[in-house]
Structure formats: structure tokens, C-alpha cells
Amino acid sequence: MINVLAMILAGGRVDELGVLTFFRPKSVLPFGGLYRVIDCSLSNLMHSGIEKVGILSQYRPFHLIRHIANGEPWDMVGRNRCAAILPPFKGRTESDWYKGTADAVYQNIDFINLHKPDLVMILSGDHVYRMDYRDLIAFHLETSADLTIAFTRVPVEGASRFGLARIDDEEERGGRVLEYVEKPKTPSSEWASLTIYLFKPGLLIEALTQNAQKASHEFGKDIIPLLVQGARVYGYKHHGYWGYTRTLDEYWQTNMDLLGSHPRIDISTYRLRTNMAHREIRDRGTAHLGRSAVVEDSLFYSGCDIRGTVVRSILFPGVRVAEGAVVEDSILFFDDTIGPGAHISRTISDVEVHVAGQTEIGGSPGELTVIGRGTAIPPGIGIDAGVTVYPNLVSSSFTKSRYVKGEVIQ
Amino acid sequence: MSDAVAILMAGGVGSRLNILVRHRAKPAVPFGGIYRIIDFTLSNIANSDITRVAVLTQYKPLSLMDHIGDGSSWDLSGRTRGVKILPPKTGEQDWDWYRGTADAVRQNLSFITSSEARYVLILSGDHVYSMDYRPMVAYHQERGARVTIGMITVPWEETHQFGTAIIDENHRIVGWEEKSPNAKSNLASMGIYVFDRHYLLELLTRHKEEDFGHHIIPQALKDGEVFAYPFSGYWRDAGTIQAYWDANMDLLNPESGLTPESWGIMTNITTGGMTYDRPPARIIGSGRAQNCRISPGCVIAGTAENSILSPGVVIEEKAVVRGSIIMHDTVIREGATIERCIIDKNVVVGENAAIGLGDSSEKNREFPSHLYSGLSVIGKQAVVPDKAAVGTNCIICPEVLAADFTRLEVPSGDTVRTAAEADALKAR
């Protein structure tokens, strides 16, 4: 089989996700009641038989390192398999943080050369989708492309956040990329880049080496537009679901797409693997739904103890909802506790948040409310939609009985 | 605890569990949604820092071997830690089956002699409980005992199932009865023994009998220094259909004392070679669940009450499951009703079928001592046809297909077999 080396860009954070990325890069953001976002890419790789992976890390890597462990959860450990975390490093002559996506890969050219791959696949670690990369590889080989990029159709309004391409309609699977523009102000195409690049290693190294001399170091901005002019660059069209998790609304929506009788994301077809030792998922007892529990259209996992009402929500392992509490349209991360009589709606709450009884948090409709990890919210207070609550707050951090839209509690 | 090794007896048939042990040994029977019975003892071993374990298997060991794997689920794999699975092996005789617990240990003495441990724990893989064995070994040491036996007080009417001991004020055992119909004590053996290594080797060489309870312990009593170690927590044998159902239902009762998660019970979640992890459980549409234990991968569009659901169970719309234990990947089709059933893995219950409804006084005609309280049991991979009406105290054997139902109505107390099995039975 063809020797493909994958490199996952997993080190970034974004301001838009606020307190959720204070302590972790966005690639390890919890997703879907069990997983981390990066599990999608890793599981896709595993099911595609690509088991040599470099994971480029930078921002607060502890949870990423812990999650990846030795790669065993994705079968990426063995004689010819690996999941290697690649942090920025101090060199003999120079040392620096990764200056951009291209620079991150450039700094690890030794890693690429070590594995002598036939192809290098560069992926983003923060997208939710299912793809058999073998189809993409076959397309790449059949078209004798130098570089193949995966694209998905997005609505033109809002498309200006993405790298957009005009693709020659050669066949159903895709065709030659005629033009590529990164985040254009006025979008002229609806095909947005998924940040999945399949490179011939020689071309990749050459392009990275040239780019290293320049001021900007991004694949989308600097390298791809240049290569479209001089090399055989093909676009591969992805038709299935694609979830973006770069803003709170997108992150929330991508999770909500798991719910319903006919969910947009049919999770069983994704065959996702995660690290079941991370946060001791595997040692959790079965979920307990008490006599007073009312659970509608929701996901929950082992370790949950539900005695209240849960509607259209996603509960990660260890969440406890007391009798008389109501949780709706919300995402509660690992080991949150919701006290009796509390009412939570449209809220994303990070791990180990404790909400005391008789509180009222979030609102509908309205902006999402977000609570940082480890915060304890005292009884009886009201936190409206669109409030941000910082991590690790204690009762005395809350000086008011009601917080309104736009406030940041810290 | 580097001065003790554990030998776990996992060969028992557990025949009173009826068709639940048709394809697996009792320790491998699923329990509480995600566990198997042996997980309790294996986790106790791991949580007691005992790192060298032998599991003696005999009866239908494949499920068990698959489940134990390399032991890493219990952190029992590594340079100084390991689980050895020891089936009976060809000896001087062609095929030396284990003739009893003591015989099984005797055939594997090299496991003990090859270690430097001073103490040997002999444990049964049949029980649901949580116990730290370290204080028991310390107790054994302090008293200078040759043998220490874990013992629990049981109801008098159950004493005939156990070895029972009469003890003096120092907990020294002065009298022993094995499964006596008129026991003089209700202090029962839990099948947990701590032996001095040298004494055990010497005893098993000196005496050639087969069973610890029947033969070896009475011999040890003659040598003296045999002590009872009293235990008073939750402990269940789960060796009958009724006891098995009761113990599972204890998971729904916060007062029962059965709390596997807080006990630190570990299991192997990858058994069966799945290529992905089970997703979270989903309740969809008009689905609802109350007073239930629900495992990952379940999808509930119908109703579940007072039940234990293993991973991957599907309850379709308008189906109702009450007071039941449903094992892995079983599907309850639309409109079916299940009442007080134990349903094994990969069963399909057809649309609008009903199981377990009706008068529960009609005991199972073939196994009246197994099924008498109204529970019905459906074997692994059975298919119950659409609109079937199966009564109480019924047995649907493993792998029965819709065609094996000669009529849709199965009266209470009946047993349904595959055609091949029924023919074989007639021929006998």
C-alpha cells in the first residue's frame, strides 16, 4: 500500500471560543457527549489505513498530549505506526514558536524525511466530518496531481471566512483548481477548503522552503494560491456533512446536529474512536436515570446521574442533574453538577462546573451562555443569555444576583 | 502487594443460570449492563495491588479469554504484572480435566513455585462484591495463620449452599461443614482463601483430594491455625436466575449497597473486536426512560422502566420494556412489550411481540427450580417473531429462529428450542 504520512494541525486556539479554549487548543474541545473534536480526523485516518501521524501542537498542549497518549486508542502504535506529538522546539541556531500553519510543517521537515512517505496529507484537527481518505488518495493518483485539496459546498453568504476555489467540472469527484482565494471579501465560489491537503512530498518541501523566507506562513494565504499557478492542483469535492467548530454558535450547532430521530450527523456511521482512558471514561458506571427523570431527545453517557429534566441536550460522562432541575438546549461537559430547581438553557458549560440549586442560566432565544471550567455558581442567582462566566470562580466571585447579556463574570 | 499472588477459579459451569451459561462460563456472564461477573474479582485484585494473577478456566472459556485479553483493562499487564490464563492441559493422562478446585490448583503448582510470593490468594470468579484483600492478608500475617478464609453471615435457609464454620472467640475455625443440610453455623465461606505458600504446597502434595471445601480445608483444620476473616459488605452469588435478576435490580436501588463505579470496578470495553467506541446513549422522538441503568450505544425511541440495558440495545417506537435485563445489541422492535425478562445478546424481538405477560404461578415445566417467579429468559441470538405472545417462566433457547415457533402463542412455563436441538432431545 502507498505510504502516506499525515500531519494534523492541532495546536491553535481562537478568541471566538472564549473560555472554552483558555486551557486547551480547539482540537481537544469535547464534542458529542464523549469525544474530542480531533477524534474525527484521527478516526478517519485510522479507518483509511493511515497510521503514521504527526500532530502539530503549540497552544497549552497538556490535554492534547494526554488525549493522544501513545496513539493506541487509534491503533497508531506498532512497528510501522505512530502518533507523534510535534511541539515547537529550540534549535541549535534558532528557536521559535510556530509562526503559522506552513511554518509548523516546515519546522518538522525532518519528521517527514524520516518517514520517506509517498504522499503527505495535511489536515486540520478541528473539523467534524467523515471521509475515507483512500478515495481522495485514489483521485489524487488518477489525476497525477501534485496537490489535491478537499472542498465542500457552503452558502455564498458567509463564505468569505473560508479559502474558496473555482474547480473545473471534470467529473463528479472534482477537477483542476482554476483559482484559489483565501478568505475573499466578496466570495465568487461556493466551494470552501476543508484544509485537507494531499501533497507530493518534494513539492511540499520545496514550497515550504521558499515560503520560510517570507513574512507570512499560512498554507491558505501564501502557499496554495502560488501553487495553483505553477503546479497540478486538484479539488476533491466532499458531499457529506461537514461541521465547523470555530465560533460558539457553530460549535453548539455542530453538537446539536447529533440530536433528533434523523440527525444530520448519524454518529454510528462515523465509527469514532476516542481515548477511553482520558478522564477515566472507561471506568464510569452505566448512566442512571432516576424515577423522576424526564429525558427527551438527548445524548448522555456512562457516569451520568439524571433525576431532573433534560431536553435537547448533550451530557458528557459524569454529569449529574438533580431532581427538579431543568436542562434544555445545552451542552454540559464532563462531571458538571446541576443542583435542584436550577434551570439551564442554551448554555455550554465546561468540565467540573457546579451549578447550585434555584439558579437560572441562559435564555431562549438569544445568545449562548458559556461557563468556564471548574466554576461554582452560587444558589439563587440569574445569568442571562449572552453572558460569559470565567473559569475557576467561587461563590464570592459573584457579587450580583442577576447578570445580563454581554457581561463577563471574572 | 508483591508478597501475594492470586489464583482465580473461573471454571465453574453455574448450571442454575440455565441458558445464560449455554455458551459461556458463569464468571463470563454479563452483569449490570457493562460488566461481566468476573470483573468484580479481577478489579478487587487490581485494587488490592496484586499484580500476578492466574485465571483457571475449564468450561467454555472463549468468552472469558476474549474478555480478559492481556489484562490491561485491569492494569494487569507489564513487566511485573500479568494475568495468566491456565486451562487444563495434557498431562500424563491424555487430557486431565480439573476434577475440582484443589485439583485445578494442584495441576498449576508451577505458577506458585515460580513466584517468590509468601502468600497465595485463592479466589472465586463467581461473586459480586467489593473487597480489599490487603487487610485480609495482614490479618493472616498477624495471627500467624496457615489458612485464612473470607466468611460472611448468610440467612440460615441458605447455609446448605455453602461451607460453614464454627469459630472461637479469636475467629479461629474449630468446626467446618461443607454444604450441610443442617448446618450448625450460618457463617459461610465466600470461597476466598489466603494460604501460606509453603503450607499450600505441602498440603496439596500430602493430600490428593479434589476440592478445597470438601477435602482440603478439613485437612487443614487438623493441622490447626485456620482463621475466619469476617466480611460484612454487599456480597451476592448471583448463581441462580432469580438471584442474578435480583442482584442486577440492586443497581436501581440506591439503598442496596451495590455501587460498582464507586468500588472502582473495571471492565474490558473492547471485547468483541469493535473498530469504534460505542457512542453516547440516545433518547429520541417520544422515547422515555425512568429508573433505568443505560449503557453507551443504546437508542431508545420507546419506553424503558426499571430495567438494565447493556451497550447497543435498541428499543424502537411504541415498544415497552419493564423490569428487565437486556444485553448487548438486542433490538426490541416497534410495539413489542417486554415484562420481567432476561434477554441475552443479539436477540431480535419482533414487532408487537409480547413477552412475560400473564400469570406467573405456572413454573417452567422442565426447570421448575430455575424459573418459578415469573421471569422469562431469551437466549443469545434468538429471534422472537412478530406478534408472538410468550408467557412467564418461559425459556427461548439461544439461536432459536422465528421458524422454530410452531405457534405464535407460547404458554407460561414453556420452552422453545431450535429444531435441531428439539430433534436431538427426542432422539435421546
Image (cartoon, coloured by chain):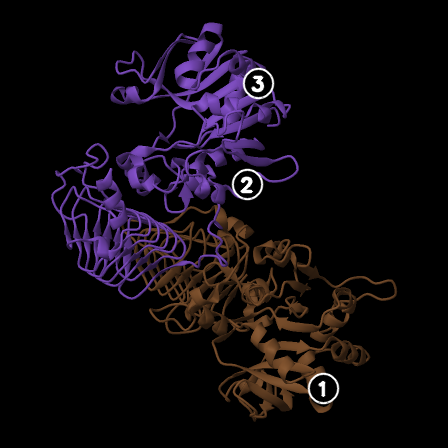
Left or right, B94 with reference to B231: right
Instruction: Give x and y (percent) for residue A79.
Output: 69, 55
- Marker count (numbered): 3
Label pair 2/3, CB-CB below 8 angstroms? no
Where does the C terminus of chain A fall, quadrant-wise? bottom right
Discs 1 and 3 share one subunit: no
Circle 1: residue type: Leu
Name which of mark 2 and mark 3 comes first in the sequence. 2
Query: Which residue is denoted by mark 2 in the rendering?
Result: B71
Q: Check the residue under mark 1 and report the chain it is in.
A: A
Q: CA gap, disc 2 to disc 3?
A: 24 Å
Chain letter tied to brown: A
As displayed, is residue B44 above or below residue A237?
above
Q: CA gap, disc 1 to disc 3?
A: 74 Å
- Label 1 residue SS: helix
Circle 3: residue type: Arg
| Of the two numbered discs 1 and 3 in the rendering, the one whose residue sits closer to the viewer | 3
Left or right, B18 with reference to A26: left
Q: Check the residue under mark 2 and report the chain it is in.
A: B
As displayed, is residue B357 above or below residue B217?
below
- Residue shown at the point (39%, 48%) measured from the top left: A286
The colour one sees for chain B in the rendered image is: purple
- Residue shown at the point (60%, 61%) measured from the top left: A24
Circle 2: residue type: Gly
Query: Which residue is denoted by mark 1 in the rendering?
Result: A227
Residue closest to the eye, A62 or A394: A62
Instruction: Give x and y (percent) for residue A315.
Output: 42, 58
Q: Is residue A193 visible?
A: yes
Query: Which residue is denoted by mark 3 in the rendering?
Result: B197
Q: Counting other residues with Cα less than 10 Å from the Cα at mark 2, is it few (<14), some (14-19), or many (20 or more)?
A: many
